[in-house]
Image: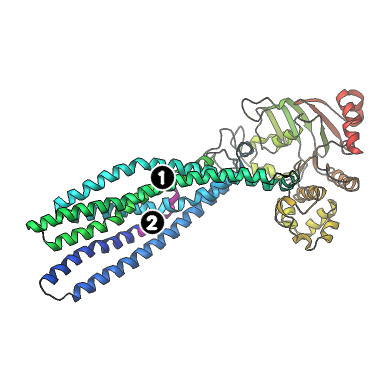
Amino acid sequence: MYRHFRPHRRVVALGGLLALIGAATGLAQPLAAKALVDRLGDDGSITGILLLLTALVVAGTAIEAVASYLLERTAESVVLAARRTLIGRLLRLRLPEVERTQPGDLMSRVTSDTTLLRAVTTRSIVSAATGGLTFLATIALMGVMDAVLLGVTLGVIVLIGGAVALVMPKIAQATRRSQEAVGEISTVLERAFGAFRTLKASGAEDRESAVVAAAAERAWQHGVRSAKWQSVAGSSVGLAVQVSFLAVLGIGGARVASGAITVSTLVAFLLYLFFLIDPVSKLVEAVTQYQVGSAAVARIEEAERLETETLEADAPPGPGTPAGVGPDRGGPATAVPATTVPATVVFEDVRFRYRDGLPYVHHGVSFEVPGPGMTAFVGPSGAGKTTVFGLIERFYEASGGRVLVDGRDVRDWPLTELRAAIGYVEQDAPVLAGTLRENLVFAAPDASDAEIHEVLVRARLDGLVERLPDGLETLVGHRGSKLSGGERQRVAIARALLRGPRLLLLDEATSQLDAVNEMALRDAVAEAARSVTVLVVAHRLSTVTLADRIVVMDAGRVRAVGTHDELVANDPLYGELAATQFLAAAR
């Protein structure tokens, strides 16, 4: 927890100091009350003492208000810093980590878990320090007044405090489980909103609502359990003071009657006893908040331990980055000069599986792609075609062999430089919430209006922009819900072309286009292939026949490479695909 508030430790220390000063003014009030009672017994003037008491109360209140503001402001800063750090880290996670983790749960760690840091990293620390010091100071003053009454008070507090200590771990356990249930809620909602039309078309609203409600009820149950133990801990303070008060009142009254102490001493002692409620409450609150915060910190640290990518050429591997991931592996990390020369791609006996224990997706894949030109990858579903693109982009690391871009192992490239040279259109052509312009310039934020207009024409989107009410500033909805499937695909292609890549990866980029737009876009891709290396996963014969070379994959292996005519004549699998799958898709 210390690392979260360490940058703000000076402000926290100042807030703690002010809180201590405020507590000191409170400690002086029973002494002033004792002097007031003595002065009343002597029939002396009490004006000065009353003014002193008023000043102590006002000053103490003002100082503690300033301390509270400083601590609350710092607490918000701690939460902000934690969220910034966590968001920056989560957006740099390696793709396999994202695929193994529920996105909704990761989002809950950024939102609800970081919120719990607010109290534990500032107020609980200051409360523990000021409460502890104030408690010791109060005990010392009570001891000076009467050791016997102090012994009675401490006996009651220790007895009840021991019982309270037993419930603290239960608070942490209940809080952690409650936060996990909140993560489940986020996960289910993220899944539902991600396929909202499918949900409605399937009539699954009630079923999904029941799943969310079950997770919400689990969060409620654990939250109530945590609240129960927190209320037990909090009410124990009042119980300890009340029992102590009764014991001190009885024993103290007897000592006054015997002449061992004066009435004013008993009054001051009782005032200190009530004053003791605040520091003891702060100590109990600090320990309780620590239990709550420790559960949140544990979940945040779990997210921070997920493996991330190293994006900069000179960045050392950070915590959670596996050995061998980053530009420092197997070769120089220096940047190569920027160039517009089309990229070359070579796979050398590449083997790959998504994680240990799973079967291999690639079993020694080898091929060469010179630039420029178009290379098509074909084969049955599950042959490993899309995985080729994932390995080129370094979304995944090859389990064996090498993937070379421009004759250089992709593991030796700084990721930012490697991906800057590549335009990538995914199979489902995702479109982000926001405006059409924001989607187009997502990979090229500095693109000019002329460049945008050029790719709109090439992707056959210029007519769409003219029809939209706000043109490029039109909101496209969540995941592009206001666009058709073909329009989303063309937006994704335009986004890739606008980047001006040296290597263009198209994963079934025309699957949702009608014949007219497919032909137009096919011509645009063919034009781009004159100056750029284009790799395309295709299921349509019309696209495949345009390729300069075709790589036929089957069961994670390359079985043939050649032109359409060569493969039809020499490879039975390709001949079967060309006669059935491609032709069926082309109809």
**Residue 41 image-quadrant placement:** bottom left
Which residue is more in the foreground, 295 or 247? 247
* Picture coordinates of residue 565, whole percent (x, y): 92, 29
Amino acid carrying label 1: it is: Gln
- Look at 61% across and 36% down and name the residue there: 100
Question: Residue 12, labelled with which disc?
Answer: 2
The residue sitting at 52% across, 45% down in the picture is 219
Q: Which residues lie in the magenta part?
A: 1-15
> How would you rate the neighbour count of disc 2 (Cα within 10 Å): few for under 14, some for 14-19, many for 20 or more?
many
* Front residue (pair 498, 161): 161
Label 1 element class: helix
Q: How many marks?
A: 2
Rounded to the nearest whole Å, what is the CA distance between mark 1 and mark 2?
Answer: 20 Å
Residue linked to disc 1:
291
Q: Is residue 11 magenta?
A: yes
Question: Is residue 314 visible to the viewer in this orientation of the structure?
Answer: no
Q: Is residue 456 left or right of residue 296?
A: right
The reply, left or right, for residue 260 in relation to residue 298 is left
Question: As displayed, is residue 82 above or below residue 413?
Answer: below
Q: Nearer the viewer, residue 95 or 171?
A: 171
